[in-house]
Amino acid sequence: MIAHVHGKVAEKIANSVIIDVAGVGYEVTVALGDYEELLLDEEVKLYTYHHVREQAEELFGFSTLAAKKLFELLITVQGVGPKAALAILSLGNAEMVRNAIANSDSSFVAKANGVGKKSAERVVVDLADKVGLPTQYSTTTPVQTELNTSDEALEALIALGYTLADATKALEGVDPALSTSKRVTEALKS
């Protein structure tokens, strides 16, 4: 399995980018938001999902680990393949999509290209309890909606199944000077 690719954006084609990794170009299909953010000749790291079929192998890339984990949940829903899951993730950032599913907002999910009303309802029914509780945003406290890819403790908590909001909250008050493993341990205690 190819877990991530790290290299320069060599080309942008339709909804894919070609990442040059030590002279080898990997074509990675990405969500609309990531496609717009990626710049040519920019050094990037994309978390990838390696999809193997009888006729083809495809890489789907995500700028955040949270988006990759949500993608993996979406493709477990009957009738939702990788392209439909990517279309759903193209509706907004991963936290926005996760929150829509948690709030049972099937009309939001149905806005994705190639996703009908019944598929959207199935996504909401199957995943509402798996994506966590809806996030209630207060106007006084800023909420992190994008994964800080330089914070390995935050990534580790998300990999353990925490939502971005829960992982961020768990790390509040934990000394950022501690090693990653100690920060994760402290966050799990709280």
Image (spheres, rainbow, N blue to C red):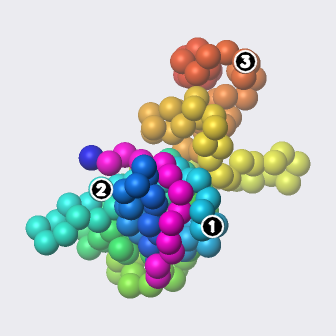
Kindly report the secondary structure that dominates the magenta region of the rendered protein. Answer: strand
**Crowd around label 2: few <14 · some 14–19 · many ≥20 (10 Å):** some
> Which sits in the foreground, 160 or 153?
153
Q: Which mark is residue 39?
A: 1
For the magenta stretch, what is the residue range? 2-14
- Residue 21, x across and y down, in percent: 43, 52
When asked about the image quadrant of residue 118, the answer is bottom left
Q: Secondary structure at mark 2?
A: strand
Mark 3 or mark 2: which comes first in sequence?
2
Labelled disc at residue 177:
3
Where residue 110 appears, x then y in whole percent? 47, 81
User: What is the C-alpha distance between the residues marked 1 and 2?
Assistant: 23 Å
Q: How crowded is the residue under tag 1: few (<14 C-alpha within 10 Å), some, or many (20+)?
A: some
Q: Which residue is mark 2?
A: 50
Q: Residue at x 81, y 48 (%)?
A: 142
> Which mark sits nearer the N-terminus, 1 or 3?
1
Circle 2: residue type: His
Can residue 50 be seen here? The reply is yes
Alpha carbon separation for disc pair 1 and 3: 32 Å
Asked if the residue under mark 3 is in contact with the one under mark 1, i.e. CB atoms within 8 Å, the reply is no
